[in-house]
Every structure is written in structure tokens, then in C-alpha cells.
Amino acid sequence: MSTPDLQISTHLIHHPYQPPEGFVAPQPPVHKASTVIFENVAAMRRRQWLDKSSYTYGLHGTPTTFLLEERLSALEGGLQCLLVPSGLAAIATTSLALLRTGDEMLLPDNAYGPNKTLSEGELAHFGVRHQCYDAMDVADLEAKITPKTRLVWLEAPGSVTMEFPDLIAMVRLCRERGVTTVLDNTWGAGLAFNPFDLLADGTHSLGVDATVHALTKYPSGGGDVLRG
């Protein structure tokens, strides 16, 4: 095992985040609750779930989901993580959050198929245009960025066909053009490389703006978990 692997493993095991008002154990407990009980209405109104310091409703998080989100965020060096029901839900949530009617989005031609289907269907109905670019040609990506381009999806490696693009050049281009980048990092899983520090110098001077994962792959072993 290499030194970076040891550092990641140690950081995940000894992550500083601990769920509030719980107990510490080698095996984090599984909380399947939807409804949360409050002492009174005043206590309910004081609670905030956004900073993960308390709980308000199962949809907003439980000690189980908060713990997993923090570990996944630590794996990639991200600032925040949000669990959703599937990888496609993560893709849809990201695109819907970042795009508005009249915006344009660029997808690599080897993108995850359902991402293309979402773009051709629902996003098109909302007035969001998209184009596909050659994932292995930085010049093609550059030629297709327009003043209306708000989001560029990246995959490294490409879904199924596994080509690996010049990720650094593409992210640098998008940053120069002021375009948001999102990486589908399902295959990299946060272990192959650090998407928020592509220069690997610890400065985070060049990285994508956000990543998505299908946790059905590496984190769960590709067997019995559907999560994004």
C-alpha cells in the first residue's frame, strides 16, 4: 500500500466529524428514521440541519447519512457532500441546481448514457440546450463553448469505454472561460486522483467545481446499494 493510500485510510478512520448527540462506536449505528421527535416547538425551531449539527427530518439527514457524507467529502477533499437515491439523481440534482432556461450545457460524447437522456428529455423541456464534445479533443471543447455555456460535464475515465481525457487542460480552459465544471467521478471514486487538486501540489489551484458519484460502484462493491 502506498503512502497516499495510508494517508487516506487514516483520515477516513480518524475523521474529526462525529454525529451530534450520539455515541461513539467502531461500527456507526444505522438510523432508518424519517420522523424526528422534539422536546417542544421551540426546540424544533432552534434546530438547523444545514451545518449537520442537529436533525430535523429524515430527508435532511440522520447520524448515519451525515457520517457517510462527511467521509465521502473527506475522500475527495470536498467542502460539502449531499446523499441522494442514485447516481442519476446526483446528476439530475446538479444540473437542475446549476442551469436555467436559456442556458447551454456541454457533455462528453462518451458520457454516462442516462445523463444524455436527461439532457435530451427533461432539460430540453425546461429550455436548456446541450451539445456533445469529443472527450479526447480539448480544441473541440473550446470550439463549442459559447457565451451561453454555463456547465461542462467531464468524465475521467469515460463511462464504459474508459478513455481518459486531458482533464487538466479541459478544467483550465473552462476556468478561463468562467464556465462551471462538474466531474462524474464514479470510476475514480476519489482514490485514483484528487479532482479538486489536479496539479497534486496541495494548493487546490486547479480543480473541478463539483463531482458526482454513483455509490453503486466502488464504495458499495457494485452489488446491493443504490445511492449517489
Image (tube, rainbow, N blue to C red):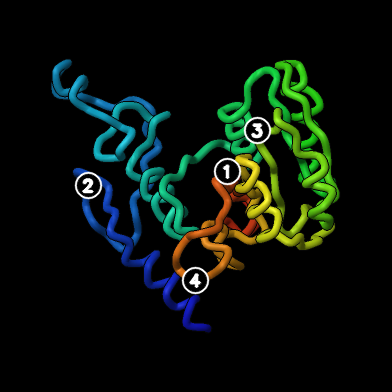
User: Is tag 2's residue or tag 1's residue first in the polypeptide sequence?
Assistant: 2
Q: Position of residue 13 (x, y in %)?
A: 36, 66
Q: Nearer the viewer, residue 156 or 166?
A: 166
State the residue position of label 1.
Answer: 228
Q: How many marks?
A: 4
CA–CA distance in space, label 1 to label 3? 23 Å
CA–CA distance in space, label 4 to label 2? 37 Å
Q: Is residue 97 left or right of residue 27?
A: right
Q: Is residue 70 left or right of residue 161?
A: left
State the residue position of label 4.
Answer: 201
Q: Nearer the viewer, residue 101 or 38?
A: 101
CA–CA distance in space, label 2 to label 1? 25 Å
User: Is tag 4's residue or tag 2's residue first in the polypeptide sequence?
Assistant: 2
Which label sits in the foreground, 3 or 2?
3
State the residue position of label 2.
Answer: 22
CA–CA distance in space, label 4 to label 3? 28 Å
Instruction: Rate crowding at label 3 as few (under 14), some (14 to 19) or many (20 or more) other CA atoms within 10 Å.
Output: many
User: Is tag 1's residue or tag 3's residue first in the polypeptide sequence?
Assistant: 3
Q: Are marks 2 and 1 in contact (CB under 8 Å)?
A: no
Where 144 sits versus 172, above or below?
above
Residue type at mark 1 is Gly
Q: Is residue 189 left or right of residue 13?
A: right
Q: Position of residue 207 (x, y in %)?
A: 56, 55
Where 104 sits versus 132, above or below?
above
Label 2 SS: loop
